[in-house]
Image: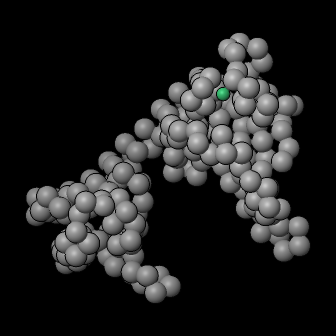
Amino acid sequence: MKTRNERCVEKGGKTKCAFCKRIGCGLSVYLSRGQIIPEELARFPVLLSSIAHYTLLRCPECGTYFKKHTVIDNEIIHGYVSVEIEEIREERVRELQRLETSWKRQFSRRVHVRLKNLRATFTPLEKAVIAAFIALQKEELSIYELVQLRPNEDRSSLQKALDALVEKRALKSIDLQGIRQYRIR
Ligand SMILES: [Zn+2]
């Protein structure tokens, strides 16, 4: 594991807790070499889980923000998987949150435009299923992902709602490596 003091963005300013001081401005954790994410960090609450495949974390003790993402290098011999964690400033956190909200809004608008003429025919559960696509900003979902997202719903009613949406031509079902995916038309 190597710390990245050279990339420090926030020098001085607020007082860091002992742990955040210790990791400096970030870490590269090479999972492929058996390194593990420090357990303190693994317990940091997630502020944002971006569709751009990163998460924002905030230290519960001192409030320092970190951006975390995974790098997968597929090169055959020297390939590796690492988790990159870097400290970021609060203004950057706000900026990323705004960006995420605007992506979500655009995605939601696009889906609504596409389904506009069908919407009146949807049952409340079918609407909730479409809302799940929007919440995840995904064009495609499987029943498994949907069940995880709506754990209080009965799986067979979710499946029925998916089938009905296919019937209404709001979704299209495709088989991807043996798993049925539902795609917004
Ligand atoms: Zn801290």
Report the side of 83 relative to 119 (left or right): right
In front here: 80 or 40?
Answer: 40
Residue depicted at 25% across the width and 60% down the height = 152
The colour scheme used here is one colour
Residue 132: quarter of image: bottom left
State the image coordinates of residue 145 (x, y, percent, origin top left): 40, 66
Residue 56: quarter of image: top right
Residue 23: quarter of image: top right
Vertical side of 165 occupied by 138: above or below: above
Residue 159 appears anywhere in the view: yes
Q: Quadrant of the C terminus?
A: bottom left
Residue depicted at 37% across the width and 63% down the height = 148
Image quarter for ligand 1: top right
Which residue extends farthest top?
13
Report the side of 154 relative to 178 (left or right): left
Residue depicted at 14% across the width and 62% down the height = 122
State the image coordinates of residue 129 (x, y, percent, origin top left): 26, 61
Vertical side of 184 occupied by 181: above or below: below
Count of numbered labels shown in the rendering? 0
State the image coordinates of residue 106 (x, y, percent, origin top left): 39, 45
Which residue extends farthest bottom?
178
State the image coordinates of residue 52 (x, y, percent, origin top left): 56, 50
Residue 113 appears anywhere in the view: no
Report the side of 114 relative to 39 (left or right): left
Vertical side of 107 occupied by 173: above or below: below
